[in-house]
Image (cartoon, helix red, strand yellow):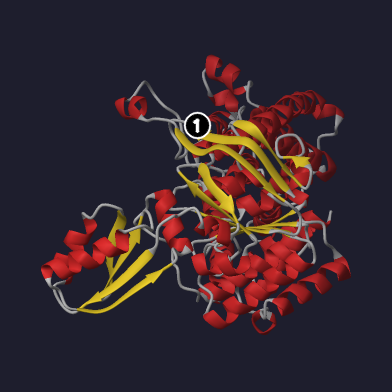
């Protein structure tokens, strides 16, 4: 179980290696504190897969690092498996399997197995128990065939899998994963999702930071959306979709697409309109009458249209609505 | 203990994978000893030189011991901060600190390989100096080992201070730089401190490395007993008792500050 109450992290004026300062510099004086996590209240029950979404810089990774004691909170409180992240750091760390991803985080000259054995030992596994457990997680992540290959020769997907394997070593009750299936091919990604499902069935709590909305919808029991450090919405996929009252209209014009887009963008009740390939995609702020207005606008300029589809808003629309972001995360399931 | 052995194994496997560096390192050491030999030959054997008399007039022995000592001390002083930097660059620091292994054990374990390597290197240098270049020692090895242990412990405290600073600054450690410079210039690595003007001699006696070098040379060249170097040993012990807790406290402070600033993994 993970609990946060008013959890806040404000980074100081100078974040990159604060170094030594000789006298006051103008640039230093101009820097403002950055609120990375802002009064976050959260409760993730045991056995839940919680998906954390948000645009880049929303505070997702900082939140994971707060839960894993790698960053100290400015205010508020957080508990992981019942242990306070400020006062019971060692217990918190022992409860967590961390997978932050990225190309680094292993020793490049060591093989996959040697790396896992090293980190397993650091986690208190020794002797036969260590060898057995390393073998199990290598098998589970289908890395047994490359266990003797130096990490530097691993593909990006293999590196990601090894990162997940390391998190599994001690079979902790909580897992914190950042971009679980990034760099992993579609077939392997399916198996990773099955692994998450299996962990959930065994009562593990999983906090999953992702940009893959389809993955979040498929895997997560609860989804939280962060923006500018705040948790702006928490709920299951269906309840989040309910936060957007409007509907999604897809129009496939037969030419004059830009002209149509320009007109539709200015219509009352249209939250946004943008081009997606040969289609114009519109999210309306309400349901009543807007579709009728859209059809009238198309007719008014006499643009030929191949098709019009009206649908419920997707999680991506909810994301865009709540974050005001044009950089929607990847909505396709790999 | 398992964790410490895991660090040693990791260091060995990495070292083994760089075969060319291994061969070049050994060649480099041999050439260094040869250079010291010819410098010492130039100076000659000076039994009557009042500055070298306490060391039996043997400048080769004086110099080789000074150089070996300096490299050992340099590792004590810099290995912790280099380890932190290297783990930051490798992206492994956060995972090490997230493990069940206590923070200080991570710091010591990660630096241990550097200590083992420098001890191995020093042994090779000393052995080749004895068997190839005719270095003559009348050594009390036990006392020499004790002196070295205390000297390295007291400088390791300074090394931990440096590691705490590197946690925050990422690059650039003024404490390590300053102490290293002083130790190299004033401790009597290349020349006896008696060659300095009186005020510099007094400054040099503030440094633990000066006391360590005096005791080490006495133990290795003149077979000095523990009682004969006891005053130097006490100074080193006092330094170690002061610098190690200070180093641990500053390292902890640097670690917490990096966590507050969110820069633990930055480099």
Residue lying farthest to the top in this orientation:
B199
As displayed, is residue A300 above or below residue B103? below
Q: Is residue B139 visible?
A: yes
Q: Position of residue A294 (x, y in %)?
A: 25, 64
Q: Is residue B2 above or below residue B217?
A: below
- Residue at screen point 53% across, 50% down: A60
The spot of residue A196 in percent (x, y) is: 68, 69
In the image, residue A282 sits, relative to residue B246, either above or below, namely below
Q: Residue at x 50, y 76 (%)?
A: A334
Q: Where does the image place residue A56, in percent across and percent down from the top left?
A: 43, 52
Tell me where residue B14 sits by quadrant.
bottom right
Element marked by disc 1: helix
Say if residue B34 shows up in the picture. no
Where on the picture, by quarter, is residue B256?
A: top right
Query: According to the image, label 1 marks what residue?
Result: B174
Q: Residue A52 at what x, y percent from top left?
A: 56, 55
Left or right, A99 with reference to A251: right
Q: Is residue B116 above or below residue B207?
A: below
B255 or B141: which is nearer to us? B255
In the figure, is residue A262 to the left or right of A59?
Answer: left
> Residue, x 78% and y 54% (percent of image)?
B4
Residue at the image position 22 percent from the left and 61 percent from the top: A264
- Total numbered circles: 1
Q: Is residue B148 left or right of residue B182?
A: right
The one of B38 and B147 positioned closer to us in this rendering: B147
Please state the chain letter of the residue tagged with numbered disc 1 in the rendered image.
B
- Residue density around tag 1, few if under 14, some if 14–19, many if 20 or more, within 10 Å: few
- Along the viewing direction, whichever of A239 and A175 lies nearer the viewer: A239
């Amino acid at each position: 179980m993970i609990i946060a109450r008013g959890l806040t992290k404000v980074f100081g004026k100078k974040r990159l290696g604060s170094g030594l300062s000789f006298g006051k510099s103008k640039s230093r004086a101009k820097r403002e504190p950055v609120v990375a996590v802002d009064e976050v209240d959260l409760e993730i029950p045991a056995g839940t897969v919680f998906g954390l979404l948000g645009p880049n810089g929303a505070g997702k990774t900082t939140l994971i690092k707060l839960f894993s004691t790698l960053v100290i909170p400015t205010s508020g409180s957080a508990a992981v498996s019942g242990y306070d992240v400020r006062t019971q750091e060692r217990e918190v760390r022992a409860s967590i399997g961390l997978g932050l991803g990225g190309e680094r985080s292993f020793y490049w000259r060591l093989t996959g197995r040697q790396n896992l054995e090293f980190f397993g030992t650091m986690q208190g596994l020794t002797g036969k128990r260590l060898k057995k457990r390393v073998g199990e997680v290598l098998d589970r992540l289908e890395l047994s065939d490359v266990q003797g290959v130096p990490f530097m020769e691993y593909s990006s997907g293999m590196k990601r899998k090894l990162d997940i394997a390391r998190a599994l070593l001690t079979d902790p009750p909580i897992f914190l994963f950042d971009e679980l299936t990034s760099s992993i091919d579609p077939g392997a990604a399916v198996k990773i999702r099955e692994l998450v499902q299996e962990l959930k069935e065994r009562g593990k709590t999983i906090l999953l930071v992702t940009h893959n909305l389809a993955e979040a919808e498929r895997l997560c029991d609860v989804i939280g959306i962060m923006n500018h450090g705040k948790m702006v919405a928490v709920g299951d996929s269906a309840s989040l979709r309910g936060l957007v009252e409007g509907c999604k209209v897809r129009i496939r014009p037969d030419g004059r697409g830009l002209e149509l887009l320009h007109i539709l963008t200015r219509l009352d009740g249209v939250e946004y309109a943008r081009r997606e390939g040969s289609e114009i995609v519109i999210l309306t702020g309400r349901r009543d009458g807007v579709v009728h207005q859209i059809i009238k606008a198309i007719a008014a300029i006499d643009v030929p249209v191949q098709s019009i589809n009206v649908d419920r808003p997707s999680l991506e629309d909810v994301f865009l609505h709540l974050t005001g972001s044009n950089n929607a995360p990847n909505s396709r399931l790999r | 203990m398992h964790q410490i052995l895991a660090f040693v194994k990791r260091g060995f496997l990495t070292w083994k994978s760089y075969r060319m560096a291994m061969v070049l390192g050994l060649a480099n050491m041999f050439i260094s000893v040869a250079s010291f030999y010819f410098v010492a030959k130039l100076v000659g054997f000076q039994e009557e030189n009042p500055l070298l008399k306490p060391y039996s007039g043997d400048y080769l022995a004086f110099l080789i011991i000074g150089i070996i000592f300096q490299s050992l001390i340099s590792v004590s002083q810099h290995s912790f901060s280099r380890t932190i930097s290297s783990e930051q660059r490798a992206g492994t620091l956060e995972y090490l600190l997230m493990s069940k292994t206590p923070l200080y054990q991570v710091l010591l374990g990660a630096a241990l390989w550097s200590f083992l390597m420098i001890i191995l290197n020093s042994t090779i240098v000393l052995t080749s100096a004895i068997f190839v270049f005719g270095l003559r020692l009348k050594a009390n090895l036990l006392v020499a080992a004790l002196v070295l242990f205390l000297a390295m412990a007291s400088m390791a405290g300074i090394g931990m201070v440096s590691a705490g600073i590197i946690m925050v600054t990422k690059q650039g450690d003024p404490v390590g730089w300053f102490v290293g410079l002083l130790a190299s210039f004033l401790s009597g690595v290349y020349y006896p401190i008696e060659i300095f003007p009186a005020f510099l001699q007094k400054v040099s006696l503030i440094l633990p490395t000066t006391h360590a070098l005096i005791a080490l040379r006495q133990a290795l060249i003149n077979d000095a007993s523990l009682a004969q170097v006891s005053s130097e040993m006490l100074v080193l012990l006092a330094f170690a008792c002061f610098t190690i807790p200070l180093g641990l406290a500053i390292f902890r402070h640097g670690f917490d500050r990096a966590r507050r600033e969110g820069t633990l993994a930055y480099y």
